[in-house]
Amino acid sequence: MFSNEERDSIYKVIYNRRDVRSFLSTPIPEDTIHNILQAAHHAPSVGFMQPWNFILVSSDETKEKLAWAAEKERRALAIHYEDEGAKETKFLGLKVEGLKEAPITICVTCDPTRGGSHVLGRNSIPETDVLSTACAIQNMWLAACAEGLAMGWVSFYKKNDVRDILEIPPHIDPIALLSIGYTENYPDKPILESANWEKRRSLEDLIFENKWGKN
């Protein structure tokens, strides 16, 4: 199905994808954004529900508001590290978002009502709508990497803040804020690994045979 070169390219994109926080203001061509969104839209979804929507944010005013929401939450989260002074300093020193710098931020949402109340495959596992949306996000992220773009997933915000800023209906779930742009600082390793925040776990320790805990 794929040549050796094509297969190697797929793995190259997977292994080189990074969560990036520093962006250039260089505009992204519209066809490139379209390609990335098409990749997201071709993600697998349970019952083919396709629960995602994409809000493209390029307004400086709106990006400022989203950055405020992220900074407010980051400050709130820092309280958890107050008893570990060094870790609190490291946490506050991390650049956790590039909302104001990136030319575009995409809010990926999940509509739990899409497809009605009897979507194939959701009776047993209701959260498959969120899982399907996560697949779309991963497709988008890998496509961005293949296009030479950097992407950062902003996870510091209250959902109601984002709903208010982007005028999202109450029943729609804002799953992710993804800042996209070109960068001059594409890291060789994940940023949190380079900052010694966490290390990559051994795959062998995460594989069990037949039953939980059986290596």
Image (cartoon, rainbow, N blue to C red):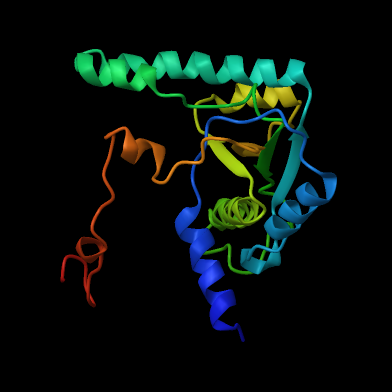
For the image, the number of numbered tags is: 0
Corner quadrant of residue 193: top left
Which image quarter holds the N terminus? bottom right
Task: Report x, y in % for residue 199.
Answer: 26, 44
Quadrant of the image for the C terminus?
Answer: bottom left
| Residue at the farthest right position | 30
Q: Residue at x 83, y 51 (%)?
A: 31
Camera sees residue 104: yes
Q: In this view, does 49 lie to the left or right of 91?
A: right
**Residue 200, horizontal then vertical, whole percent:** 28, 50
Residue 16 in the image, given as x and y percentages of width and height? 48, 54
Closer-to-camera residue (153/44): 153
At a point 67% along the width and 64% down the height, the residue shown is 119
Residue 172: in sight, yes or no? no
- At a point 69% along the width and 31% down the height, the residue shown is 170
Q: How far across and how far down the image is residue 148, in percent?
A: 64, 50
Residue at the far front in the pictured view = 184
Instruction: Farthest residue to the left: give it.
Output: 214
Which residue is found at the position 55% from the left and 68% from the top? 10
Q: Nearer the viewer, residue 42 or 53?
A: 42
